[in-house]
Image (tube, helix red, strand yellow):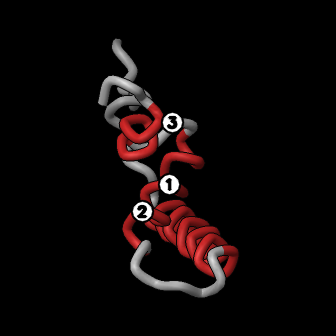
Amino acid sequence: MRHKTASVSTAKPDKSSLELTEELIRVRAYQLYEERGCKGGHHLEDWLRVEAEIVGKKPAAVRSERSPNA
């Protein structure tokens, strides 16, 4: 008899962990906003940067800005 187990790639995170992750992103993005002197206009960049920090990857915009051939 085979046991059904969820693999890492097909397992869905529960709602509470998604809400917690979103809250962490929101708080950190607000910190970036404050570090910039509360100057607006960068909310999407901040959000993507923090998402990348959490998953350990650099956002595409940051990579292309630093790449001399971009």
The residue drawn where x is 56% and y is 70% is: 29
The residue drawn where x is 53% and y is 61% is: 17
What residue does disc 2 label?
45
- The circle drawn on residue 57 is 3
Does 8 appear above or below 37? above
Q: Amino acid at mark 3?
A: Lys
Distance from Cα at disc 2 to Cα at disc 3: 14 Å
Q: Picture quarter containing residue 37?
A: bottom right
Distance from Cα at disc 3 to Cα at disc 1: 9 Å
The residue drawn where x is 42% and y is 29% is: 67
What residue does disc 1 label?
49
Q: Secondary structure at mark 3?
A: loop
Residues at badges 2 and 3 in contact (C-beta under 8 Å)?
Answer: no
Residues at badges 2 and 1 in contact (C-beta under 8 Å)?
Answer: yes
Front position in the image: 61 or 9? 61
Distance from Cα at disc 2 to Cα at disc 1: 6 Å
Q: Amino acid at mark 2?
A: Glu
Disc on the earlier residue, 2 or 3? 2
Image x and y of residue 22, in percent: 49, 68
Q: How many other residues sit within 10 Å of disc 3, few (<14), some (14-19) or many (≥20)?
A: few
